[in-house]
Image (cartoon, rainbow, N blue to C red):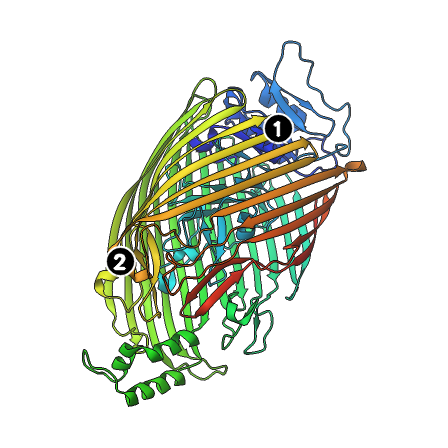
Amino acid sequence: MAERGRTFRQSFAHVGIIGPASLGLLALSCPAKAGLGGPANISVPQQRLEKAIQQLAVQTRRQVIFAPSPLTRKLSAPIKGYLTFEDALRRLLRGTGLTFRQSVNGVISIEPEREEAAPPATPAEPVDAPPNPQALVVIGPHIFEPVTFAGDMQLRPASFSLDALLDDGAGPSAQPGSAGQQGIVVRGIGMAGEATTAVYFGDVAITGPSGTGSDASRTTMDLALVDIYSVSTARTARNTEHGIGALAGEVEVEPEPAKLGKWEGKSTLGFSLLEGGDPGYQLAGTINAPVGENAAIRLTGYANRQGGFVDNIRTGDDNVNGDAMQGVRLITRYAPHADLDISALLTWQHRRISDSGAWSRALGRYNMDRQFLAPTTHDFLLGRLKAAYQMDHVRLTSISAYYRWKLDRKFDRTNPTLLQASDPAACQRYFALGTGAMCDPQQVDAFTNHVESLTPALLHIPITLRRMSQEVRLESRPGGPIDWTTGVMLDHRSEHFSSGLSVYTDDDAPTDYFGLREMAISRTQAAIFGDVAYHGDGGWLASLGLRYDWHRVSSRNDVLVPNIISGSIDSWPLTVKRSQGLYARAHLDLPVDDHVTLHWQATRSFRPAGVNTASVLVPNQRTFEADSLLGAEFGLKARWNPALSFTLMGYLNVWQDMQYRALSENRSHAYIVNVGNAAIAGTEMEMTVTPSDRTTIRLSSSIILSQIERIAPAAAAVGVVEKGDSIPFASTFRASLSLMQRWPLEDGRAITAKAHWQYQSGFHSTFSRNDPDYLATKGFLLLNTDAAYNWRDASISVSLKNLFNVRADLRALNNGFGAGQTFSYRPREFSLIWTRRW
């Protein structure tokens, strides 16, 4: 994160810690290690001072806190050599008007020099470890606008998956998808069409395949969060600063970088027990190796298995939704001099989900009755090359990336197939009757028998997604009152897949299709963007950003074996949809006094138009229009160091021509339509109380109110939509409460404990209660607990998730696969994890 240099995030150094973290400081922390007082190979290029301190703290595994000020935005001196942490920090601070001191618990505090100040306090002689290392429990360092939520930034997260990380607060949330993926919902926006929230892994925007529903929002990045430096979440899109455009928000995942001049490693071993389900395990290992003075490599490998908990009462199989993944990541870095830094990332991951995690409400908790098991496999390969070159007045950054995502889906399609037995249009197709002619009773019986002979039915959708992107940014050299960024982005995605419907057999007999088609989707994007920020006297900040995007989306559908049951009969040639749109953002942070800063921001973002892949659609339904989001937010952050921080935000978003997922009349296909306009208003609050450096309490909450204000003609396709209806799949109220406590022991040992409560109100699955597919869920309250024992370079932690074994419904809907299809939080789960660093 320290290398990003983006204008919006350069504006303020903010402690992302539980404790002083949310009080407007910057904290950097790494586990205590024997010999901290000794010298090490240190290489910190010239840059903004606050970023240089970040890099020094990471390289030396020390904890540093400082208050943001104009002094920390000065240009630092380059530091390179075999130095102690104290000597390197003195060189960075020389001539800046800042000094440092070390507390009794080993924390380094940077503060302005005073005329009467004594020389910086340092230990008289090196010790094996500070008497009380890591007195502050770190969530993360970050550089961003001062009025924001500390919980949106996490440093070195313990969660293995992105959805578990998002569920830790009351802000953005994750809802399960049918292929073991997650759809991210930010302020009620998401879960249909192209992804509304951009997810980055190592500066690469990763979007999953869309498949036959043109619905990529349900296949979010699923790379394991192993050896991760930080995860940050933005509740509005940062389109004008970098990367791929997004409609609602962004999540950035930064892997640990390769570190120059340092040997280090880490290993993790864990297992879990799931109530009513299968056990799981977690294995991971990392090694960082220097290659000469100017290069390094970092290699990480992992394997993880989550036990299943859904039972198939038809086949007698228990715990069918087991989820296993393995992966390898290689990062190389080459920095021949202080002005040039080149890094390459290569990662591969394989994931296999034994069956869908959906269960049927009618059959009872965690029970389903599908005809057979239908696994889903993911194979993901990513390569990225990043180069940053510091010139006299600007910094040039280039990011080139390619990834391939192979997703092999299998579905039990028996129930949707049987539904077609009562479809008069399907019977007409079967007997080739003319327009307006109806099947007689004998023909209806014959057609019903034919449909039943095609079950159990298997839908097989192997998909290969390839994506290439190139981003180039120019950024101002830090140190002045004005920061700016400008750049261009080129991006191309292509999907090739088939959709085959056949009678399910468990032998090796040749597949007998009664529906088979092949499809190709292509998406090309070009964009220019820019952002400028001004840091005024007294700490106020104003910024303005613009971005313009051009999109071309095309689709081709070739029916190879007509499916007269569902209506997939005709092919269509290449269909193209072009769109272009403007993103804009204006932002102001204004300090009122030493304790309170006001915040205002206005945004405009858009999502491109697209082409549907459902073959039953008439020509005027095969494409859909772009939608856009107009947003305004106003809030404040109040700080009373070091005991209390309070952030409050109110917002109003107007979602115009919103894209939404519809089912065809015979419920055999899904497609995207524009249903009209929605207004979404909400408030978000976060409060952190730190009565001591050993105790932290954090409370956060979110309220979302929405209603449909305009209904488009196509809205009838999604069911009953009326003015005043609220948007589906958005909980009105969410809240979380965390309590963390630390007990320091002798010899650098410590015990930490955390209790985390999460409440979420219920939601509904369609717009209106008058819709026959309307389904409402109940609210739930979850309690997760964690405890850890740390000593020197090792730790052992235990956790108990869903302590009260609550049935927490994360997503529920009625569709062609059945009524009351429900995805839930996992049952009570105990895990034990051992970690060792060297």
Q: Is residue 593 left or right of residue 556?
A: right
Q: Nearer the viewer, residue 135 or 646?
A: 646
> Quick one: SS at disc 2?
helix
Would you name the residue on which mark 1 appears?
65
Q: Residue at x 54, y 37 (%)?
A: 686
- Residue 17 in the image: above or below residue 92: below
- Disc assigned to residue 726: none
Point out the frontmost of discs 2 and 1.
2
- Residue 109 in the image: above or below residue 425: above
Q: Nearer the viewer, residue 483 or 334?
A: 483
Return the x and y of residue 514 as percentages of the image width and height: 35, 79
Q: Nearer the viewer, residue 233 or 126?
A: 233
Q: Residue at x 62, y 25 (%)?
A: 89
Q: Residue furthest left?
A: 435
Q: Is residue 541 left or right of residue 223?
A: left
Q: Nearer the viewer, residue 668 or 783?
A: 783
Q: Amino acid at mark 1?
A: Ile
- Residue 126 in the image: above or below residue 785: above
Tell me the CA gap for discs 2 and 1. 55 Å
Would you name the residue on which mark 2 appears?
714
Q: Residue at x 45, y 69 (%)?
A: 819
> Quick one: SS at disc 1?
strand
